[in-house]
Image (cartoon, rainbow, N blue to C red):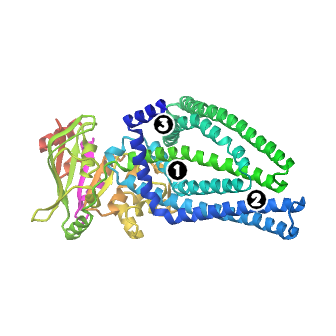
Amino acid sequence: MKEKVKKIKDHLKDGTLKKMMLQTRWIYQYAKRYWKAMILYTVLGLIGTAVSLIASLISKDLVDIITGHQTGELLRTFAAMIGFSIANVLVSQASGYASAYVSMKVDAEIKNEIFAKMLVTDWESLTAYHTGDLVTRWSSDASNISNGILNWIPNLIIYTVRFISALAIVVYYDPTFAVFALLGIPFSALMSKPLLRRMKNNNQRSAAMNAKLYGFNQESFSNIQTIKAFDMIPFYIRRLKNLQSEYIGMRLDFQKMSMVTSVLMSVIGFAVSYSCYGWGIYRVWSGAITYGTMTMFLSMSGTLTGAVNSLVGLVPTAISLTISAGRLMDIVEMPQEDFRQDDEVRQFQMNYRETGIGLCMEHFTYAYENGTSVFEDASLEAHPHEIVALVGPSGEGKTTMLRLILSLLRPQSGSAYVCAGADGSRIEMTASTRKLFSYVPQGNTMFSGTIAENMRNVKPDATEEEIIEALKLACAWEFVEKLPAGIESVVKERGGGFSEGQAQRLSIARALLRKSPILLLDEATSALDVATERKVLKNIMTDTYPRTCIVTTHRPTVLNICSRVYAIRDRRCQVLGKDEIEQMLHDF
C-alpha cells in the first residue's frame, strides 16, 4: 500500500497525472461532437450482448429438453436458438459496418481539422519538427484518437453490462458456480500490471521510432538523385538496416514481456476453465443442476472472462490515447498565426487595385530562437512599379528578410506594414497580408500534375489565355508551346521532366498569374542565363499591372535595371549608390 501511495505521489510530482488529465480533456472536446455516433455504437453493442445471452439461455433449454430434464417443444426451441444465432450474426455485422462507417467519417473529420490547425501554426515553431514526425502525428496519432473516441466509452459500457448480465444469470441459477467463474479475475488483473507499466513507455518509443523511420524514407526518396550522385547507396542501405534493427529490438523487447504475460494468463485461464468443468460435472452428478445449466455456465464463464479481459484491455488503450493526444497537442497548441485582418486586407486590396500596394519596414530587429542576431535597426521600402533588389553574401539574411515580409517570422521590434495611396494608408503585416503577395522561393517548387494544374493552384478560375499570358511574361511559353500537350504537359514530382531553368520560369509564371500586388523572388532567376533573367525582370517592369517586385540575388548583372538596391551589411539594409553598383558589376 505504501508503495502505491509513493507511486501516486511521484506521478503528481512529475506532472504525469496532470498531463493525462489535460490530454483527456483535449480528447473530450472531440468526443462530445460525436455523441450520436457513440450512442449508436453502444446500442448496437448492447443489442448484440442481449441476443448472445438469450441464445445461451435458449441453448440451455434445448439441452434440457433433449436430456429429458425439461418439457417443451423441441422444434420451437431449436428454431428459436437458430433464429437468435442468426440475429447475433446480423447484429454483429451491422455493428461492424456502422462502426467502420462512423470511424472512417470521424477519422476524416478529425484529420481534416488537425491538418488545418497545423497549416496555421506558427511557421517558426513548426520547423522544430521533422516532416516525417509531423506526418506520423497527423496520420497515426489522429487515427488513434478517432478510433478511441468512437470505441472507448461505448466499449466500457458494453463490457460492463455484459459482465454484470452474465454474472447475474450465473448467480441466479447457481451462486457457487459464480465463485469458480470469477477465480481468474484477480489473476488477470495482477498479470496485466507489468504489461500496463510497459505500455506507456513502449507506445512513446514506438511513435518516435515510426516517425524516425518515416522521416528517413521520405528524405531518402526525395533526395535519391543526390544519394546516387555521391554514391551513397551502400551508406543509406546500412542506415536503413540499423534503423530497422533498432525498431525490431524495441518491438521484441516489448513482445517478450507480452509473451510471458500471455502465457501466464492462458495457464490461469485453462485452470479456471477446467475448474469450471470439474465443478459443473460434480454439480450435474450430484443432481444440483441439469446438463443444460452446466452448458450455459460454461458459456457464461467464457463471457465473464472475456468481458473482464476486455475491460482490463481498455486501460492500455486509454494510455495510448493520452499519448497520441499529447503528441498532437504539442503541435496544434503551438502559437497560431493571426488571420483576424482578412476582411480588412481584402478591402484594402480592392481599394488600391488600380494604383498598387507597396511595403515599408522600419527599424526592425530579428534574432533566431538560438539567439543569433540577423537584423538590428534595419529598414526597407518598396513601392508599385519598382523592382527592389536585396544583395549580399549567402547567410546574411536575404531569405530571412522575405520570410519577415511574409510574416512567417516575427521581428522582435520595429514596424512592418503594407502601404498604398497618397494618403499613406497602411496595414500592419500579419499572416492576413499574405493575400497581397506572390512568392517564388529558392529551389524547385513545382507540384506533381500538369502545368495548367500547377498554375491554377494559385488561381483556380484562370483561363487558358491567362495562363499563356503569364507563361509569356516569365519567358516560359517559348518552351511550353513546343511540348506535345502544351499547358497540359505533366510535371513530375519536384519539377521532374524540366530543367532547373525551365522549372524556375514556370514557378515565376505561376506567381505572376496570381496577380498579387507584391511579388517576391528569392534567387528565383539563379538558374537562368543573364539574358533571360534580364528579359523576365524587364517584362515584369513593363507589365501594366501595378506590381511591386522584390528580388534577392547573388548576381549583380540585373542591378542596373532595379529601382533601388539594398545591401545587407552589419545586420542593416543599406541603399547602394550608382558607383557601388557599377563597382559590383565590374567585379562580377
Contact? badges 2 and 1 (CB < 8 Å):
no
Q: Give the left or right position of residue 481, taking residue 577 as reference.
A: right
Q: Please rate how many residues cluster around mark 1, counting C-alpha atoms within 10 Å: few if below 14, some from 14 to 19, many from 20.
A: some
Give the residue type at disc 1.
Asn
Kindly identify which residue carries mark 2: 56
Q: Can the viewer see residue 304?
A: yes
Identified at 69% across, 45% down, the residue is 179
In-front residue for pair 439/532: 439
In-front residue for pair 329/360: 329
Contact? badges 3 and 2 (CB < 8 Å):
no
**SS assignment at label 3:** helix
Kindly identify which residue carries mark 1: 144
Residue 550 within the segment the image draws in magenta: yes
Kindly identify which residue carries mark 3: 226
| Depicted 79 relative to depicted 551: above or below | below
Identified at 58% across, 62% down, the residue is 42
Q: Please rate how many residues cluster around mark 3, counting C-alpha atoms within 10 Å: few if below 14, some from 14 to 19, many from 20.
A: few
| Depicted 229 relative to depicted 442: above or below | above
User: Which region is colored magenta?
Assistant: 536-557
How far apart are labels 3 and 1 at the CA level? 36 Å
- Dot 3 or dot 1: first in sequence order is 1
**SS assignment at label 2:** helix
Counting from the top left corner in percent of width and height, residue 269 is at 72, 40
How far apart are labels 2 and 1 at the CA level? 34 Å
| Depicted 509 relative to depicted 201: above or below | below
Name the image quarter holding residue 275.
top right
Residue situated furthest left in the rendering? 423
Identified at 67% across, 63% down, the residue is 50
